[in-house]
Image: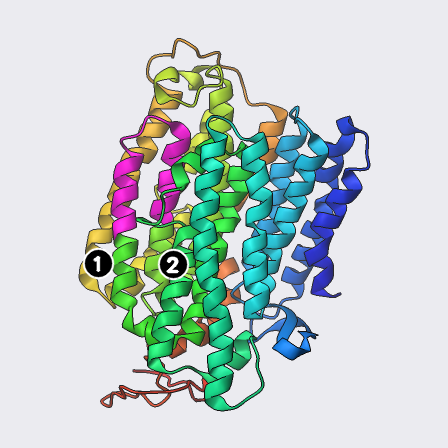
Amino acid sequence: MSLSILLCLPVLLALVATQLPERYVGRGAALLSLIPLGIAIDYLARFNPGNSGLQFVTDKLWISSLGIHYKLAISGLNIALVVLTAILFTISLAWSSQRQIDRPKLYYFHFGLAQSAVLGAFMAQDLVLFVGFFDLMLIPFYFLVGSWGTGDRVRATVKMVIYTAVGSFLMLAAAIATGVLASGQHSTALTFTFTALQHLGLSRTDQDWMFLAFAAAFLVKMPLAPFHGWLADAYKSMPIPAVAVFSGVVSKVAAYGFIAIVLPIFPQASHHYQTLMLVIALFSILWATAMAFTTKDARLVIAYSSVAQMGFIMLGIFSLKSTGDQGALLQMLNHGIVTAASFFIVAAVAARADGSENLDDMGGIAFRAPVLASFFLIVTFANLAMPGSSNFIGEFMILLGVFSTQMWIAIVATLGVVGAAVYALRLFITAMHNRVGGRVKSFEVRRIEVIAIVPLLALILVLGFYPQFGLNKSQDSVKAAIAPAAFGGCQNDFPGRTVLSCVAYDPSKTPTSK
C-alpha cells in the first residue's frame, strides 16, 4: 500500500463527509477518520525496528528540472508520530461531532486538510516537499482560529500567521540554498532529498547560516521562548479540538525536523551551536514553568506547561547523545498524548464551571464527579512525570543525556521538574477540591468525555509501564540521525584525535565510540 493513500485519505474523507446532511457531517467525519487510523496502525504493525533506514518508500521525480522528488517514507523517527497524529485527529473529530458547530462542512474539511498536512510533513523525505507541507499546516489552522475561535480571535490569528510565516520564509530560503549549494560544491545534479544532502555535505560557513534559518522556523513553531509571542493568544482562542491536535502533533513537526533534518544535514553547525540551543531550551523550561504556576487561566497553565515540556524535548535533542535523543523522541509521543488529554479535561472542567476556564471560578468539582477527578489525577501524575507515568522515562532519559553533555544545564533543568509539581498540583487541587466555586454545577463524566479521554489515559498507562514500545522502534534510527552531529560532522573523529575541519559525513563509517 502506498503512503500516498495514507497522506491523501484524511482530506478526501473530509470531502466525503461534507456531502452528508449538516447534522451528520461531524459523526461521518469522526467515523471515516478511523480508516486512516487503521492504516497507520497497519504500518506500525509491519514496521521492522531492526532496519534503521527508510521503509515503505514512495519516491517519484516530481519536478525534474529542479530536482524535487515526491518522496515519502516511514522510519524509526516518524512511525510513532504518524500513529499519534491519526489517534489525536480521530479523538478530536469525535469530540467535535458531539457539539453544535457553525458551518460544519467547512470546519471538518479544515480538520481533514490539517491532518493530511501534518502526515505529509512527518513522512516527507525531500526538503522542498517538507517545507510545502510545513506551510500547508498553517492554512487550516488559520481558518479554525479565525472562524471558529473565541475571544480576540482576529488578533490571535494575525500574530500566529506573522510569526510562523516569517519562520517559514527563512526555512524555504534555506532549503533552496541547501540544495543549490550542496550540488554546486560537489558538481552533482540538483537534489533536495534528505539522504542525498546528508552525503553531499556543505561547508562549515554555509551550514551555520542554514542551521540558523531552520532553527528559527522550528523554534517559532514549537514554540520555545523567546519565540513564543503568538502562543498565549492562539492557544486561548483555538477551539479545544484544534488546540489539542496543534499542541499534540503540529508542534512536534518542528521538534522532529531538528532530528530528521537539521542534525544529519548540518552536523557541524549542530555541534557548534549545541550550547546555544541547550540554553534556549533551559530558558524556555524556567520561563514557562514560572508562567504556568502564576496564571489563573486553566488552559494557559496547560499551554505554558507544554512550552516547558518542549524545552525538555529540545534538551534531549541537543544533548547529541543517543540516550537523550531517544528520550526526546519518546517524550514527543508522551507529550502529545498527555497535553491532548489535559486540554480535553480542561474543557470538561470548564463545562462544570459555567463555561469559565478561570481557576477562581472552579473548585469542589470532584464532590459529584469522582470519575472525572480520577481521570484528572492520572493526567496530573503524568504531567508531574511520576514513576509509572509515560513522562517519567522520557524525562529521565533526557536528563541522563544532558548530564553527560552539560551537567550544569541538567542540574538547573531539574528545577523545571520541581516547578511542574507546583503548577500541576495547583491546577488539580484548585479545580477539583477546595471550596465549591460560585458558578460550579458539578456532574459526572459524560459519554463523549469518556470516548475522548479514556483512550488517551490508556496510552499514558501503557507507555508508562512499557516504554519499550516507542524506544525499540526508534533506537537504530536515532543513532544514525545524531551520529554526524555527535561527532562534529567528522567521520574520522576517534578517541584521542580531534578533526576540526570536515566536509561530509559517511554513515557507513560511523565510529562506535568517542
Q: CA distance from mark 2 to mark 1?
A: 22 Å
Q: How many marks?
A: 2
| Residue 34 in sight | yes
Q: Is residue 452 left or right of residue 231?
A: right
Mark 2 is on which residue type?
Answer: Ala
Residue 284 highlighted magenta (yes or no): yes
Question: In terms of sequence position, does the residue under pointer 2 or pointer 1 come before the other?
Answer: 2
Image quadrant holding the N terminus, namely: bottom right
Residue bounds of the magenta highlight: 283-309
| Residue 375 in sight | no
Q: Residue at x 48, y 57 (%)?
A: 168
Q: Is residue 494 left or right of residue 336?
A: left
Mark 1 is on which residue type?
Answer: Ile
Residue 351 coordinates in the image, percent (x, y): 51, 20
Query: What is the number of the mark on residue 299?
Result: none
Residue 508 coordinates in the image, percent (x, y): 47, 87
Q: How many residues crowd around disc 1 within 10 Å: few (fewer than 14), some, or many (20 or more)? A: some
Depth order, front residue of 396/402: 402
Question: In the rendered image, which residue does mark 1 sit on?
Answer: 409
Which quadrant of the figure has residue 506? bottom left
Residue 499 highlighted magenta (yes or no): no
Q: Residue at x 46, y 63 (%)?
A: 171
Instruction: Say how the picture is coloured.
Output: rainbow
Question: In the rendered image, which residue does mark 2 sit on?
Answer: 216
